Image (cartoon, helix red, strand yellow):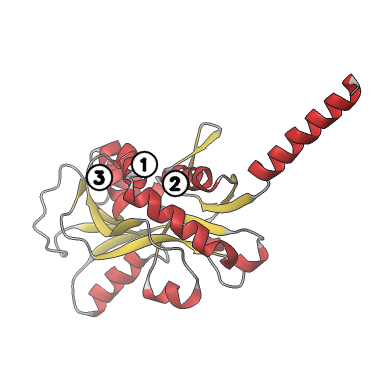
């Protein structure tokens, strides 16, 4: 065998190994928002980013990430994206379950009230000023309170970042956040998280490629049972 033929055979073997090992790609759409998926300098970071990297490793698949706004969570839009999964702290509400197919859940969360660290609050919703994001569940909740006759003081903002700033500068007293996000903000800024959640729910990913359902759910089950996902959560929000 000539050296040329030997090199050719070696290159072919490497190519076949690469195809076998890395031939499948897992295309993940990440909904941008701390602490689930966000830019840290020029690198992606976040809870969902780490979880889906771990899932890709478990399945021996290369993971490609596509950063998307939360507004893309639309049944008319998602099938056109050519992705396998959409993730990003998505609450598996009854309404969403009617519209989307989900993976099995891998995080327990809910909706929490975050308070400034200097506030002492007994739970009376008429005693504090809330910040709510336009179009959010929090906005719907305060409007329902108002309709029920409660005297609620609140201001509306276009982003969670604005709400955080207004908590820090003491323009508002409290706001509604995903529970995991609330724990993250508590660790980062010293905010309080009220002990009673507005509601509890699970977080999962929207499944767009049903042929991967069993593989993904098996990998998620393993990462939940062996503590990998809990360790990822703890690294961002601390023990809870």
Judged from the image, the secondary structure of the residue bearing numbered disc 3 is: loop
Disc nearest the viewer among 3 and 2: 2
Q: Residues within 10 Å of mark 1 (few under 14, many from 20)?
A: some
| Residue 132 coordinates in the image, percent (x, y) | 34, 60
Q: Cα distance, mark 1 to mark 2?
A: 7 Å
Q: Which residue is mark 1?
A: 232
Q: Which residue is mark 3?
A: 170
Judged from the image, the secondary structure of the residue bearing numbered disc 2 is: helix
Instruction: In the rendered view, tell whether residue 181 sits above or below residue 78.
Output: above
Q: Quadrant of residue 170?
A: top left
Q: In this view of the protein, which residue sits in the foreground, 7 or 190?
A: 7
Disc nearest the viewer among 3 and 1: 1
Please tell me which residue is depicted at 74% across the width and 33% down the height of the picture.
Answer: 14
Q: Cα distance, mark 3 to mark 1?
A: 32 Å
Q: Which residue is mark 2?
A: 51
Question: In the visual, does 22 lie left or right of 147?
Answer: right
Q: In this view of the protein, which residue sits in the foreground, 76 or 126?
A: 76
Judged from the image, the secondary structure of the residue bearing numbered disc 1 is: helix
Residue lying farthest front? 1
Q: Residues within 10 Å of mark 3 (few under 14, many from 20)?
A: few
- Is disc 3 in contact with disc 1, using a CB cutoff of under 8 Å? no
Q: In this view of the protein, which residue sits in the foreground, 31 or 86?
A: 86
- Is disc 1 in contact with disc 2, using a CB cutoff of under 8 Å? yes
| Residue 115 coordinates in the image, percent (x, y) | 21, 50
User: Which of disc 1 and disc 3 is earlier in sequence?
Assistant: 3
């Amino acid at each position: 065998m000539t050296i040329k033929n030997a090199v050719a055979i070696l290159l072919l073997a490497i190519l076949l190994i690469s195809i076998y090992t890395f031939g499948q790609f897992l295309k993940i759409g990440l909904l941008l928002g701390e602490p689930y998926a966000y830019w840290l300098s020029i690198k992606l970071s976040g809870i969902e980013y780490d979880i889906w990297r771990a899932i890709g490793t478990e399945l021996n698949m290369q993971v490609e990430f596509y950063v998307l706004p939360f507004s893309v969570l639309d049944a008319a839009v998602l099938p056109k994206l050519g992705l396998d999964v959409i993730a990003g702290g998505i609450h598996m509400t009854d309404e969403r379950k009617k519209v989307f197919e989900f993976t099995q859940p891998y995080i327990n969360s809910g909706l929490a009230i975050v308070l400034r660290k200097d506030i002492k609050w007994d739970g009376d919703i008429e005693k504090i000023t809330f910040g709510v994001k336009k179009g959010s569940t929090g906005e719907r909740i305060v409007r329902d309170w108002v309709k029920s006759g409660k005297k609620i003081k609140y201001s509306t903002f276009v982003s969670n970042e604005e709400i955080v700033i207004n908590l820090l500068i003491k323009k508002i007293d409290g706001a509604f956040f995903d529970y995991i996000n609330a724990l993250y903000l508590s660790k980062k800024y010293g905010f309080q998280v009220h002990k009673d959640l507005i509601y509890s729910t699970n977080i999962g990913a929207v499944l767009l490629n049903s042929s991967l359902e069993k593989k993904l759910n098996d990998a998620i089950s393993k990462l939940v049972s062996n503590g990998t996902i809990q360790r990822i959560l703890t690294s961002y929000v601390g023990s809870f």
